Image (tube, grey):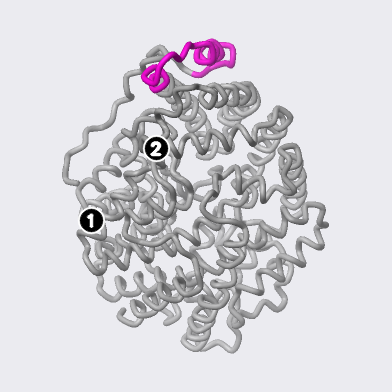
Amino acid sequence: MNNVMDVPKRPVRHFLPENFVVTTWEELKPYLDQLLDQNIDSAASLKTWLKHRSEVESVLSEDMGWRYIRMTCFTDNEAYSKSYQDFVQNIQPQAAPYSDLLNKKVLESPYLKSLEHEAGYDMMIRNLKKEVELFREANIPLMTEITTETQKYASISGAMMIEMDGQEMTLQQAGVLLQSTDRAKREAVYHKIATRRLQDKATLDELFTKLIGLRHQVALNADFANFRDYMFKAYGRFDYTPADCFAFHEAIQAEVVPILNELTKERKQQLGVSELRPWDKAVDAEGRPALKAFSDGKDLTEKSIACFSKLDPYLGQCLSIMREMGHLDLESRKGKAPGGYNYPLAEIGVPFIFMNATSTMRDMTTIMHEGGHAVHNFLTKDLELNDFKSPPMEVAELASMAMELISMDQWQIFFPNDEDLKRAKREQLEDIVETLPWVATIDQYQHWLYENPNHTSEERKANWNRIFDRFADTVTDWSGLQESKDYLWQKQLHLYEVPFYYIEYGMAQLGAIAVWRNYKRDPKAGLQGYMNALQLGYTKSIPEIYKAANIKFDFSKSYIKELMDFVKEELKKI
């Protein structure tokens, strides 16, 4: 895809005024009323109406996006927090009933049948039916309260700082020191980070208890037995069930945890320690200084653009445009929310990447990951409707995780030294072996949490340890660190902010390995398959999109074994 892209301009609006900006509910309401009252008298007018609705949704979605972005970039800016809260408390709740009425208007149209066999419309109709089935007026205030409470997690986490060697650091910045070859220093940093996290353990525990209660009530209101079953419906998981998730957990325990144990034993031997401790997990096993992939945010940006450009000029242009538009905020700093994300901006079509980079290889792979999401947004931005541009998460994460792997052939841009490059590739593949059991841990924990919504804090702790131990290596010594282990789950923001969004990482990781295997066999065809799949957006089902990439949507034990055997072979080659 060598075509040159210009910096995108906002598309011409056909329904809302060009100068319309989301300010108050009173200003927005007339346009939703107009959509609701509009007469649809033919298949053509239904299509036009859907485009008008899509335009309104894009403007609303992008406005909320910018409010969220500013709030997470500057958690200590009260005006940004209030702006986000205003949308969540005063605009979103008012718009929700309209969304349900508009969904019903579409589904009741006699002209809908004429669109059922057009690409994308079948997926859209399926989702609209699901939305109507889930909607309950009683859940609107609960959703508002959940979003407001969720925001507290970012504020609490963003304020966590420690002092090390006379310097104040974010926990992300301090985490880099866990790669130090000085074991005493690693231990000291580990304890400082753990102690700081534990200072807020009770606050975060109470917040989580409140969120579980609110979410369970949402599920009951919508006639579901529990929030897990509600979320499977809400996420549109039409292609797999909770039972498939449990099968995935078993397959990971059987096929991946033994490899994790092998690698951990190897690490312990290489480090020459009598006991492998949690602060020994990030340091180079051969005692070499931590890999440094870049010097600062500017260097990371330039190297990432060069890496993407070598893969394909189109990919490099995506990141270049984001840089030019100011859609990158990469470096860690005080007052910034934790984590990283790629936020799609529905009207302009150019997303925003947020992350907390310091200088590590993990930061470099994070921008490869988020850059994969960004490329996905660029490839779908010209699809006809907003619905078509929002793929299921199992596809969205395939875009990001596959990019981490197929970009490895260009990593000499970050690691010009051949030994460093080999080391970086090895760390990436070892990370896959660590990621899959962690995904299974978090996913199984969520199933337990929401199947047992009335559990006590003690039961929560006990079941966290039970599930953690099922998927953890048997080599690491946690003695004397029980409290830290008890609350490890609190650092996983998905549990607070996007419940049940985690199994997708495991499914997509398997898909990413398959994409990478295709790429290793034939780089041109492998990359084209990847792009072909992403361009579909949500105009096809998950299995069909995976098929477009020439891979399978499969998480059976035999398929996981086949893919992990490939990873083991690649590890041997390095």
Q: Quadrant of residue 167?
A: bottom right
Q: Amino acid at mark 2?
A: Gly
Residue 285, x across and y down, in percent? 45, 80
Mark 1 neighbour class, 10 Å CA radius: few under 14, some 14 to 19, many 20 or more: some
Q: Is residue 116 above or below residue 535?
A: above
Q: Amino acid at mark 1?
A: Leu
Is 40 within the magenta?
A: yes
Q: Is residue 203 left or right of residue 361?
A: right
**Taking the image as drawn, is residue 196 in sight?**
no
Disc 2 designates what residue?
120
**Distance from label 1 to label 2 (Cα)?**
29 Å
Which residue is nearer to you in this view: 499 or 226? 226
Disc 1 designates what residue?
311
Which residue is nearer to you in this view: 34 or 310? 34
What secondary structure characterizes most of the magenta part?
A: helix
Q: Is residue 505 left or right of residue 47?
A: right
Instruction: State which region is magenta.
Output: 22-48
Residue at image position (80%, 62%) is 459
